[in-house]
Amino acid sequence: MSHFPAPKNDLILRAAKGEKVERPPCWIMRQAGRYLPEYHEVKDNRDFFQTCRDAEIASEITLQPVRRYRGLIDAAIIFSDILVIPQAMGMKVEMLEGKGPHFPEPLRTPEDLQAVLDYKVDVLKELDWAFKAITMTRMKLDGEVPLFGFCGGPWTLLVYMTEGGGSRIFRFAKQWINMYPELSHKLLQKITDVAVEFLSQQVVAGAQILQVFESWGGELSSLDFDEFSLPYLRQIAEKVPKRLQELGIKEKIPMIVFAKSSWYALDKLCNSGYDVVSLDWTWDPREAVKINKDHRVTLQGNLDPGVMYGSKETITRKVKQMIGGFGGGKSHYIVNFGHGTHPFMDPDVIKFFLEECHRIGSQ
Ligand code: CP3
């Protein structure tokens, strides 16, 4: 018996497993954060990672969209960041106001990389704050909606660890995989090992569904994706359930992969061990459904977040196209954006979007 409150809404868990549902479950990547005035109120002038590390504050921010969109949102996602894995691996990461992530000492030489490989990572100790926040949030949710745990994809984390932040041309990450492919593989393997343990321990702490964000997937050629991303994404899908068994978790935990802009990999991702594949907005849903032959996975996505800057009529039309394109939404489909919210979005417009998804998805 679980020591957590009984679930009152398990729509997303059922849809992820391919069961028939009354309407498609809805959630939004980056549903907590800067577009919500209540986020700024709570975060105040605190440093971003300090916010994540304070269980009370992180769980409050996680609950904000669930509260604001009560009855419209079918999942919560723990407030944290994909860059907490590099931090756990001994790297310093700062979040610069208005600029994004910054690594003061990115990996630029084989010696830098060797130091990270030699660093012994104690996931339970380094990330204990994340597990505390998850447990507290799961209790506070009181079964209202399931709670997501997540992590970054290994390739995406390699990009941040070598570039030192975001990038346009990915000079350093590309240098690593092309100049030092073997060392790059060693780093990807180490990140994967940490990710498997981190995701598994998030479930022990109370996460009920997991998503892996391979946000820079589309920066790789199809062939390089097969070499530097896909094998590690597969390993995560294969090893987490095994680790969960060792840890005494009996139920099946649905897993989602989001490899942004890796359109060429959809067929392979449908066979990669994940229950759900999340799509960016460049997909015509009907094409994706065709490629996902025999409903091998549940598809998630994929409205262009930019539609939130449009008129109500446009939002309604595009929600119809999306849900219709995914087959009506009564099975093998989860509503989401094709990427995260932006800080400029109007929370009331997002509410309208969610209401339309409910209305159209219930028909
Ligand atoms: O609501 C949620 O989705 C949960 C929290 C969450 C955050 N980041 C909070 C955050 C999640 C799931 C992430 C994942 C994440 N972080 C990704 C993968 C998803 C994606 O967008 O592709 C990536 C690439 C990152 C790395 C990252 N973190 C960047 C590039 C930035 C700066 C740019 C930006 O979009 O803000 C962050 C900062 C960050 N992570 C903020 C939030 C709310 C903004 C921090 C602030 O308040 O200034």
Image (cartoon, rainbow, N blue to C red):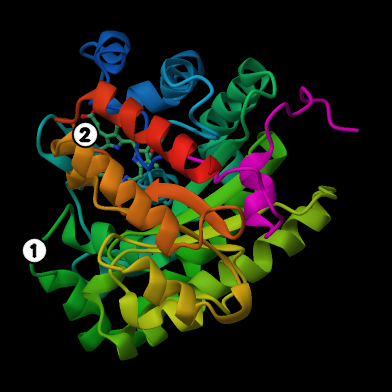
Which residue corresponds to the image point at 51% horizontal and 39% vertical from the top-left?
126
Q: Nearer the viewer, residue 343 or 228?
A: 343
Q: Can you identify the residue that label 1 sits on?
A: 168
Q: Which residues are magenta?
A: 1-26
Residue placed under numbered mark 2 in the picture: 312
1 or 2: mark nearer the eye = 2
Q: Is residue 359 above or below residue 326?
A: above
Residue 345 sits in quarter:
top left
Q: Amino acid at mark 1?
A: Arg
**How many badges with numbers are in the image?**
2
Pick out the residue farthest to the right: 1
Q: Residue 304: percent from the left, percent from the top?
A: 24, 52
Question: Compared to 306, does 169 lie above or below?
Answer: below
Q: Callout 2: 10 Å neighbours few (<14), some, many (20+)? A: some
Quick check: 217 left or right of 250? left
At x 48% / y 36%, what residue is drawn? 358
Q: Secondary structure at mark 2?
A: helix
Q: Using the image as rendered, state which of residue 62 and residue 334 is in the foreground.
A: 334
In the image, what residue type sits under mark 2?
Lys
Asked which quadrant contains residue 235, the reply is: bottom right
Residue 49 located within the stretch drawn in magenta:
no
Looking at the image, residue 230 sits to the left or right of residue 311; the answer is right
